[in-house]
Amino acid sequence: MALSNPDKKINPMSNKGSDVQSTTVPKEKVIKHIVLLQGPVGPFMDRLHRHLLDGGYRVTRFIFNAGDRWFSSRLKGQISFNGSLVGWNREFERFLLADRPDMVVCFGSERPAHKIARELTGEQAIPLLSLEEGYLRPGFVTVEAGGNNASSPLAGSIPSAEINAEALHAEVANPTDYKSFSSFVRYSGTYYIIRTFFSWKSDRELFHRRFFPPLEAFYWLRNAYRNVFHGGADNPIIHRLLEHHPSNYFIVPLQVAADSNLKEAAKGWNSQRLIVSSIQSFAKHARQDSQLVFKVHPLERGHNRFESLIQEVSKDHGVLGRVHLIDTGSMGLLARHSAGMITINSTSGLSAIHHGVPLLVIGKAVYEHPKLAVCGNGKPDFDSFWHYSENYPPVAPVAFRHEYLDWLRQQALVRGDFYDTEGIKVACAGVQTRIEAIIRSRGFSDVGQSVSESDDEPCADLAVSL
């Protein structure tokens, strides 16, 4: 049997351990049922599970593998799924039809299991709330109805002219930097090691990232080495660019190869194709004194920096001294002093919008709008972009660009963090606020319940226990 539901016989309306004598819930206090799928690596989804239980919700959480299970404290409402994508489609459809939950929450709308969940919830008119890393960081996480990035309901949109920019800015100003990168690395290592070695074979079809553990460990050790010992080697290049080539170099952020954005939304593009095509065009059509800079993603520098490819293509086209590869440095600083940015659909594009530099977006992105960027739609004109001022309208005014970014924060993000302890608390509260807003918009006057059962009761058993 694919689904293991240890809590099926538990009555979510019971008041075990409570002084309340009646189990009747007032009509205006109808219990809402929230379903949780996979979350970010680490304990965030478990903390959200507990937070929603404490808020009076009925919660069902699906566990897909040993990594998910490791970061679970076995709260009530937990179900283990073991099976294929076809099996997940069948079982989740049955679950939705039988239980009719009020909302489904997941992290990463393009993960295999979550793409199926998006399709099924769409067919059954059940809201889906999709979480992601914050479009604008630090201090925010993405929380959107329906999907993220190219699948975001905001993709290609801009704020209305009637928006109160001053009030909007005050609402999203002064974010907290939780400095959680070290926690993220620790959680990632733990999650993927446990997921790989302790999951059942039947779990693996639903893995959203696959790798060979010893090789992956080597990549992350190399990442740490390059961060500590190679970062200083980039400083002379960065200083030379800022001092001798201000506003005369183009920056190209390279994305993580396993990024879900580099699939359908990339319009057939990847880092290799971007490197080759941009260097070829740069050599033939850019000004002779301009520079081209490839910036490696912090999570990718241990895996593949494409150093050999960049050097080989640059040498073949006679621009080896004008093309640079850097691992470290502030993307904001580099973008601010650049002549422009080229990206498939990286959220780094929002940095270009913030600093008011020309932006060429090749694939589909949340910020893909002609007032914000040159939209390549899979067929970018690199040749013209090197001479932006001659071929395109001026970059949008600063007031409009900052208004757009504040609006994006307000509409798609909530304060908090997925990996820092305090940031998780803040993010859980923000997610609950979004859940309540969506439920109310669907015609319910109140959410949660006025009585609560013992929320610390663990599941009786699990399909796999670690």
Image: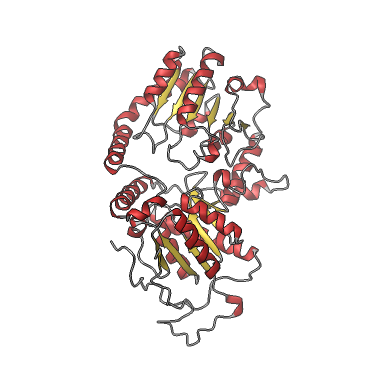
The image shows residue 431 at horizontal and vertical percentages of 51, 59
Display coloring: secondary structure
Tell me where residue 210 sits by quadrant.
top left
The image shows residue 403 at horizontal and vertical percentages of 63, 42
The image shows residue 119 at horizontal and vertical percentages of 56, 54
- Front position in the image: 162 or 81: 81
Quadrant occupied by the C terminus: bottom left
Tell me how many marks there are. 0
Residue 426 visible? The answer is: no
- Direction from residue 279 to residue 455 in the image, left or right: left
Which residue is found at the position 61% from the left and 30% from the top? Answer: 376
Quadrant occupied by the N terminus: bottom left
Q: Residue 354, relative to residue 251: is it above or below?
A: below
The image shows residue 320 at horizontal and vertical percentages of 42, 15
- Direction from residue 311 to residue 155 in the image, left or right: right
Which residue is found at the position 53% from the left and 36% from the top? Answer: 266
- Front position in the image: 134 or 421: 134
Tell me where residue 47 sits by quadrant.
bottom left
Q: Residue 273, relative to residue 109: is it above or below?
A: above
Which residue is found at the position 53% from the left and 25% from the top? Answer: 338
Residue 437 visible? The answer is: yes
Q: Residue 449, relative to residue 394: is it above or below?
A: below
Q: Residue 269, relative to residue 66: is it above or below?
A: above
Which residue is found at the position 54% from the left and 28% from the top? Answer: 341
- The furthest residue to the bottom: 21
